[in-house]
Image (cartoon, rainbow, N blue to C red):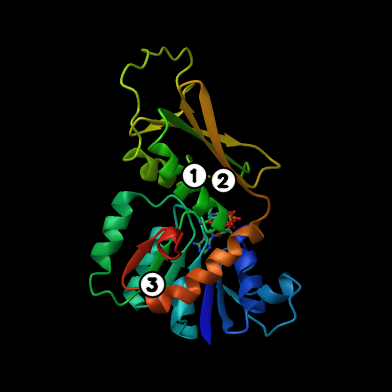
Amino acid sequence: MKKVIVSGARGKMGEEVVKLVNRTDNFDLVGAVDVADVGEDINSLLGIDSAEVLIESELEKSIEANQPDVIVDFTTPGIVMGNIKTAINKGVNIVVGTTGITEADLENIKDLNQAGESKIIIAPNFAIGAILMMQFAKKAAKFMDDVEITELHHDAKIDAPSGTAIKTAELIKDNLNSKEDKVEEIEKIPGARGANLDGINIHSIRLPGLVAHQEVIFGGLGQTFKLRHDSINRESFMPGVKLAIEKLDEIEGIVYGLDNLIEI
Ligand code: NAP
């Protein structure tokens, strides 16, 4: 039985994780942490017929009281690093879905976890289809002249570009043979051509009605090639979260990206 604390339990993703843990036979929800509805029973709030789990406001106290095997964190970019540090200090495993973690943050996490007591899985996207999109984009890059990425998310998303878009660009960049003779562009409105990561333009769209979507559009001589992934609801991320919790036993130290846990 895996004892799980959900951090950000009252958030949109956190609530899905609470449901996942409750419906999975060998998972046991032992704690729920959030700044909202502190002292309320998360299971009753979500209409789940299960033992009472009161929402606590401090992760550290929840770890001490509930002795979890794993924390699953879906909080906010400003909070997540503090939570990872808390997990490392307490020697607890953590699965992180919160986005906004930079390469510098990853180095910092590796330094902090040098003793390696905590097993850490960080995935900017837990949707299996998104992992396939990223891997196929990496392969396609070898054969096309150029690429741009458009990521589309709901209007409550704080960070831009999305962690998935950044990871996609990082995977593509070494395989891409961009043509050298690009025109010198004039941006009549600054930002019109999007953000740029190592020569790859990334465009971020935020609108109500969207969940999480991405297009990777390749261009070549007389042709384009488009890869698109759509998460139409937040349940789409749960098989990946379940896989990550289960795979913790098999990993050492830190794993970044769900693609490192599945064979494609
Ligand atoms: P959300 O609904 O805003 O959820 C965040 C939750 O964390 C809220 O309930 C928030 O409470 C709570 N929170 C704030 N400060 C906290 C603290 N100190 N301790 C514990 N909880 C705290 O956002 P979401 O849509 O669930 O997304 C959460 C994160 O997951 C975002 O970074 C998002 O980009 C990411 N995400 C990742 C994936 C993936 O596959 N990896 C997929 C979707 C989303 P308040 O609202 O009261 O501040």
Q: 52 or 107: nearer the eye?
A: 107
> Marks 3 and 2, Cα distance to the nearest angstrom?
25 Å
Percent coordinates x, y for residue 126 in the rendering: 53, 59
User: Would you call the spot at circle 1 few (<14 residues within 10 Å), some (14-19), or many (20 or more)?
Assistant: many
> Marks 2 and 1, Cα distance to the nearest angstrom?
9 Å
Task: Tell me the number on the disc at residue 162.
Answer: 1
Foreground label between 2 and 1? 1
Does dot 2 land on a helix, a strand or a loop?
A: loop
- Could you tell which of marks 2 and 1 lies nearer the N-terminus? 2
Horizontal side, residue 92 vs residue 126: left or right: left
Residue 214 placement: quadrant: top right
Residue at horizontal 23 percent and vertical 63 percent from the top: 111
> Marks 1 and 3, Cα distance to the nearest angstrom?
24 Å
Task: Tell me the number on the disc at residue 157.
Answer: 2
Contact (Cβ within 8 Å) of mark 3 with mark 2: no
Does residue 7 appear in this view?
no
Residue 88 placement: quadrant: bottom left
Whether disc 2's CB lies below 8 Å from ligand 1 is answered yes
Residue at horizontal 35 percent and vertical 28 percent from the top: 178
For badge 3, the amino acid type reads Ala
For badge 1, the amino acid type reads Ser
User: Would you call the spot at circle 3 few (<14 residues within 10 Å), some (14-19), or many (20 or more)?
Assistant: many
| Residue that carries the numbered disc 3 in the rendered image | 87
